[in-house]
Image (tube, rainbow, N blue to C red):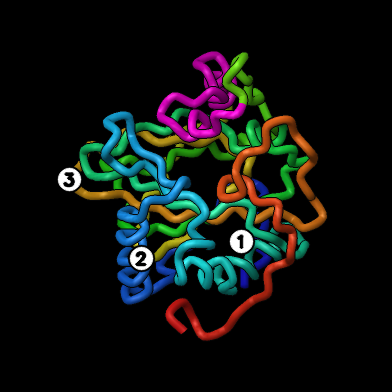
Amino acid sequence: MLTESQIAEYWSEGFLLLEDVFDASDIAALRREVTDLYETDHPGRIFEEDGTTVRGIHGCHTTGALFSRLVRLPELLASAEQLLESKLHVFQCKVNAKRALRGEVWQWHQDYSVWGPKDGMPEPRAVNVALLLDDATEHNGPLLVVPGSHRNGAITPWRPEPGNTSQWEADLSAKLKFALDAEQMAKVTADSEIRSVVGRAGSLLFFHPCIAHGSGANMSPIDRTMAFVSYNSVDNELREVPHPRPEFVASRDYRPLELIDGGLIG
């Protein structure tokens, strides 16, 4: 359970890092499952521009047994329920690979800038929970955030390209259609410095869907794998949109999650 000071820090800064939440055996088991998912042909598997390096895997809670448990564990779910004061469902569950020497950038963006207009999410009543599956260092493309940038809401919305509105893969590539430009980032960082989220494998990061964030290329010989669960309030059902993204990218299953006991491995 989160303390009052941790909850206050999340709402003030837009993110909260908890070190060493999961032990080495849990992380090793998740890594093995991730390796299996890398090698499984699935429409939610996305590649880098080289066409061979896995960039991300989406819908992991429906294809991986451990991920199905992970999204219901109190370390993630109960804490997210505290932050949003609501029952929750899984909106997204994914792994961002950021492979050694091959992992490409994620441009500066806000998640809600696409979740709102493209997925029909009425309000940013959601929270991202990221689990570090590798150590995140200054050199392997750590997540970068701008503390406090969530307070101004969505800065720039997703802008569809004529004739290309159904190609959801473009929303997850190294060239985002909803990236923040230099002028916008100058305003965002005028009163706050960019911070890199570094930490040991097993740490948890909670961050707001409106916080400006991104990451550079992985310039190290060490992978920087992160698992992400995006929880949405069950009272924040997505509106109908012209070209809904696949269920494994933007889930419309609003059944509230129930907490489970027994840890990750059970």
Residue 148 image point, x, y percent: 61, 38
Q: Position of residue 48 (x, y in %)?
A: 33, 34
Q: Residue 149, located in which quarter of the rendered image?
A: top right
Q: Nearer the viewer, residue 141 or 53?
A: 53
Q: Which residue is mark 2?
A: 33
User: Does the magenta-highlighted stretch encompass residue 177?
Assistant: yes
Q: Is residue 199 above or below residue 67?
A: above
Image quadrant where one finds the N terminus: bottom right
Q: Residue at x 28, y 40 (%)?
A: 53
Classify 10 Å Cα crowding around label 1: few (below 14), some (14-19), many (20 and above): some
Q: Which mark is residue 6?
A: 1
Taking the view exactly as shown, the residue that stands out farthest to the left is: 221
Which residue is more in the foreground, 266 or 47?
Answer: 47
Q: As displayed, is residue 160 above or below residue 109?
A: above
Distance CA(mark 2)–CA(mark 3)? 21 Å
Looking at the picture, how far across and down is residue 171, in whole percent?
52, 31
The span shown in magenta is: 166-190
Where is residue 77 shown, x and y percent of the image?
62, 67
User: Quarter of the image holding residue 134?
Assistant: bottom left
Q: Give the residue type that dot 2 points to.
A: Glu
The kind of residue tagged 1 is: Gln
How far apart marks 1 and 2 lie (CA) works out to 31 Å
Please state which of the two labelled residues, at mark 1 or mark 2, is closer to the viewer. 2
